[in-house]
Image (cartoon, rainbow, N blue to C red):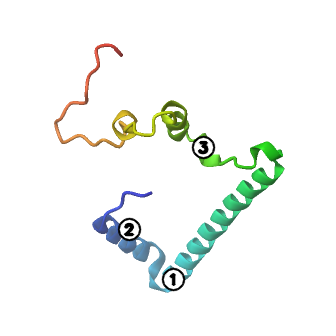
Amino acid sequence: MFDINLGELGLLAVLALVIFGPERLPKVASQAGRALRQLRQMASNATEDLRSGLPEEYRDFNPADLNPRSFVRRHLFEDDPAADTSSVMSDPLRDELEYGERPPYDDEST
C-alpha cells in the first residue's frame, strides 16, 4: 500500500517524536490507530449496506470490480485464462525508470 522503506519510517518516527513530544506521542498514536480502525469499519459497513440494498440478481456484486484495471482485465481476458495480463496491463506509473533513462516513445500515440 505505502512504499516506505525503513529509513523513511525512522525519519517519520523521529519527526513525530519531535512534533508531539515523548509524553503525548503514545496517546496520539493510539488515537490515530482508533481512527483508522473506525474508518475501516465505516467502509465495510457501507459495503454491506450497498450489498443489502441491491436486488437479488446483484448479490454477488463486488465493489472492487469497479476498479478500471480489474474491470478491463475481466472483460478482455476472461475468455482466455492462459493470457498473461501482467505484461499487457502493466501500470506505467509503477514502472520506475533509472536516473537519466528516457520513457518509452510510441510514434502511433503521439
Among the two numbered marks 3 and 2 on one chain, the one whose residue lies closer to the N terminus: 2
- Mark 3 vs mark 2, CA separation in Å: 34 Å
Judged by depth in the image, the label closer to the viewer, 3 or 1, is 3
Q: Quadrant of residue 107?
A: top left
Residue type for callout 2 = Leu
Instruction: Please state which amino acid type lies under the numbered disc 3.
Output: Asp
The answer to whether residue 107 is above or below residue 6 is above
x and y percent of residue 12 in the render? 38, 68
Q: Position of residue 83 (x, y in %)?
A: 39, 36
- Amino acid carrying mark 1 in the image: Pro
Q: From the image, tell me which residue sits under label 3.
A: 65
Instruction: Give the residue drawn at x 59%, y 67%.
Output: 36
Give the residue at mark 2: 12
Image position of 41 with respect to 54: above or below? below
Q: Is residue 20 above or below residue 3?
A: below
- The mark nearer the N terminus, 3 or 1, is 1
